[in-house]
Image (cartoon, helix red, strand yellow):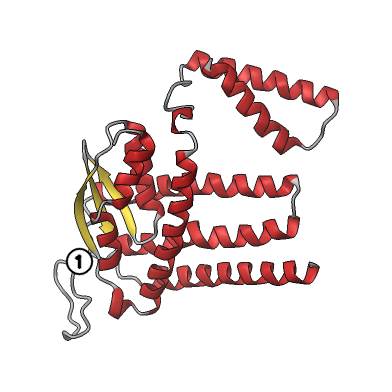
Amino acid sequence: MRTISLILVLFAVWLLFSGIYTPMIIGFGIASCIIVALIARRMDVIDAEGLPFQLGPKIMLYWVWLLVEIVKANIDVAKCVLFPKKHLRPSLFHSKVTQKSDLGKVIYANSVTLTPGTVTVDLHNDMILVHALTEGSAEGVKSGEMDQRVTQVMGEA
Amino acid sequence: MELLLDIATWILMMSGCFFLLITGIGLLRFPDIYTRIHAGGMADTLATFLIFAGLALQSGSTLVTVKLVFIVAFIFVTSPTATYALAQATFVAGLKPRLDGFDNSKAPKNDSNAKDEA
């Protein structure tokens, strides 16, 4: 079932990338999509991690929220670069992770890193080690809002 | 309409370039490797996004725009992974982040535990 949906996803992406729609080229496209899907199936990488359909539309909403956060954080870091004496207060601290699955933890840790001003340095069982640039960005992680949102997206709340 | 699009493209791309410039200044200005990683993070996120948004406005609703969106998506997935690898390698190698000595109310002095050879 997941193999067939992988073929469909691959073919949709192929159609978007190609732009040449003659029968022979499309035939090549279909053939290569099927071969890739078969190889992926043989490698045993088509599972809930490789093809996370269970996240559904919730992840899209999360991305929109994350984009707004990234814009805010970028302005903070830009201020910090221009006036380092006033804003620069680096800190290194542990924060709790509430996601159970590896995929959820990776999404959370990558979101923390993607937001400028906070970088994930280490990920233990249920703790992440975060390096933050300013007090504001450290508070952002400590408040746990992003953590809760990722848990919600993963459906593990 | 053409003019409006051009102006919007200019605004987006110039603000992207502004953030790239800030990134460059930050990379030079910050004291140790951990803080410099933060500065580099700006080029990966908002600067890239703004520049590609400007380019997408120029290409209009064509397949080129789709490809630009895909490029941004790939950068947004891969760059934090690379950043994490860098930070983790630094941490495992035993380089301690500088956490004090930034308060300008105190007289600037060389604190002995700061390891900013990086």
Q: Residue furthest left?
A: B112
Quick check: B83 left or right of B95? Answer: right
Quarter assignment of residue A13: top right
Residue at image point 22% right, 39% down: A124
Residue shown at 75%/35% (left/top)?
A18
Query: Disc 1 marks which residue?
Result: B99
Along the line of sight, the residue nearer the viewer: B58 or B22? B58
Residue in the image at 18% along x and 77% along y? B110
Q: In which quarter of the image is the C terminus of chain B?
A: bottom left
Residue B117, by quadrant, is bottom left
* A7 left or right, relative to A80: right
Query: Could you say which is closer to the camera, residue A95 or residue A130?
Result: A95
Name the residue rendered at 14%, 70% in the picture.
Answer: B112
Taking the image as drawn, is residue B118 in sight? Answer: no
Query: In the image, B51: left or right of A96?
Result: right
Image location of residue B33, percent across then percent down: 32, 61
Q: Is mark 1 on a helix, strand or loop?
A: loop
Q: Is A34 rendered above or below residue B22?
A: above
In this view, B51 is above or below B77 = below
Q: Estimate the x, y position of residue A17 in percent, counting from the top left.
A: 71, 38
Residue A124 visible in rendering: yes
